[in-house]
Image (cartoon, rainbow, N blue to C red):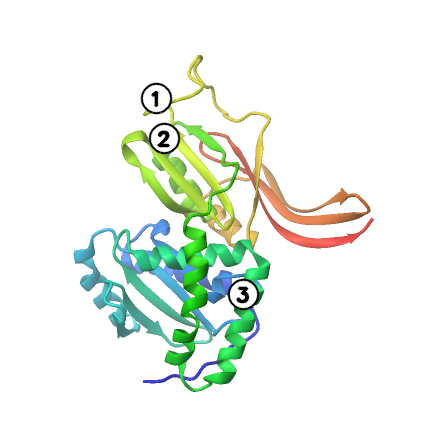
Amino acid sequence: MATRVEIVDYDPEWPLQFSRASIELQRLLDLPACAVEHVGSTSVPGLRAKPLIDIDVTVAVPANISTLASILENAGYRPRGSRHGDGVFAFLMPGNPGRRVYLCPPQNQTHRDRLNFRDALRSNPHLAFAYCLLKEELARLYPEDGDRYTAAKSDFIRSVIGRAAFAENALVPELAVTDWRISRNFYVDLIGFSVLYERPEEGFSFLTLGAAQLMIDQIGTGRTFDDEAPLVAPLGRGLNLQLRVPSVTAILARLQQAGHALAVPLEEKWYRRDDHEVGNRQFLVADPDGYLLRPFEDLGMRGF
């Protein structure tokens, strides 16, 4: 059945509303935070979107999907079926904004494509702007037909995903860690990275967040480059990793909930760049091994 297409201005509350929904779903479905991802247009800062928070939930054991589906239905989510025959089942919770939750089997390609598309738009404002223009044009063409609106975006989305799937930064830090699972949980559950791929037998994960990429590798498992002398915590002395994020607020909330202390509290800091200044809203936090991470959101620029 065709649905009305409504696109509204970006709401800076959307990341916080996702964060609250994520916590509710983790408790309801008894899943770790890393299983719940914000996807869709509301996950891209500044992008106009339908007022609907899209959430992918990865279920480690596919046989459990039917049980979790029943739990969602009992909690008031309306089942929307599996439209693409890929094992992903959708559920809708009306509201303002509403929620659309997808139960995804592990290693699901639809889920990976959503993450790649989201991260590409987050890291490239020009691409996000082009997508916004396309959405507005299609909303004018198909104001009462959500199915045709969605189908008409598919070529653009496929082209972006195709480029993103093979993109790799020229410089990717690799952190030697004492326990790769603990480190992965910190970067995924608290900071917001996604696992692009990993090699558990080597204690290795390749992580992405927007245009940022990071490798973690367990000391003594697989290949360790700096193995001439034992590494002593805190690791990474003299180094801090700056990380651009859409919003620091949601990350701070997760760190606070986990009882994770900050090395430097939230601040607004302006740095001179030639004849102007650029602003960061930022804080500093140590990961489980002591590596310092500095998430920041861009405050723009001002005259110097």
Q: Do the residues labelled 1 and 2 touch (CB within 8 Å)?
A: no
The image quarter containing residue 218 is top left
Give the class, few, some or many, for how many residues have Cα within 10 Å of label 2's Cα (few <14, many ≥20): some
Residue that mark 2 sits on? 179
Spatial separation of the CA atoms under disc 2 and disc 3 = 35 Å
Quadrant where the N terminus sits is bottom left
**Residue depicted at x 42% and y 57%:** 161
Q: Which residue lies furthest to the left in this view?
A: 63
Task: Give the residue type at disc 2.
Answer: Asp
Secondary element under disc 2, as helix, strand or loop, is loop
**Residue depicted at x 53% and y 49%:** 252
In the displayed structure image, the side of residue 70 where residue 242 appears, left or right:
right
Task: Give the residue type at disc 3.
Answer: Glu
**Residue depicted at x 41% and y 51%:** 165
- The image shows residue 64 at horizontal and vertical percentages of 19, 57
**Residue depicted at x 83% and y 48%:** 304
Viewer-proximal residue among 86 and 76: 86
- The image shows residue 80 at horizontal and vertical percentages of 28, 74
- The image shows residue 269 at horizontal and vertical percentages of 70, 45
- The image shows residue 126 at horizontal and vertical percentages of 59, 60
Q: Label for residue 13?
A: 3
Spatial separation of the CA atoms under disc 3 and disc 1 = 43 Å
Task: Give the residue type at disc 1.
Answer: Gly
Secondary element under disc 3, as helix, strand or loop, is loop
The image quarter containing residue 202 is top left
Secondary element under disc 1, as helix, strand or loop, is loop
Residue that mark 1 sits on? 220
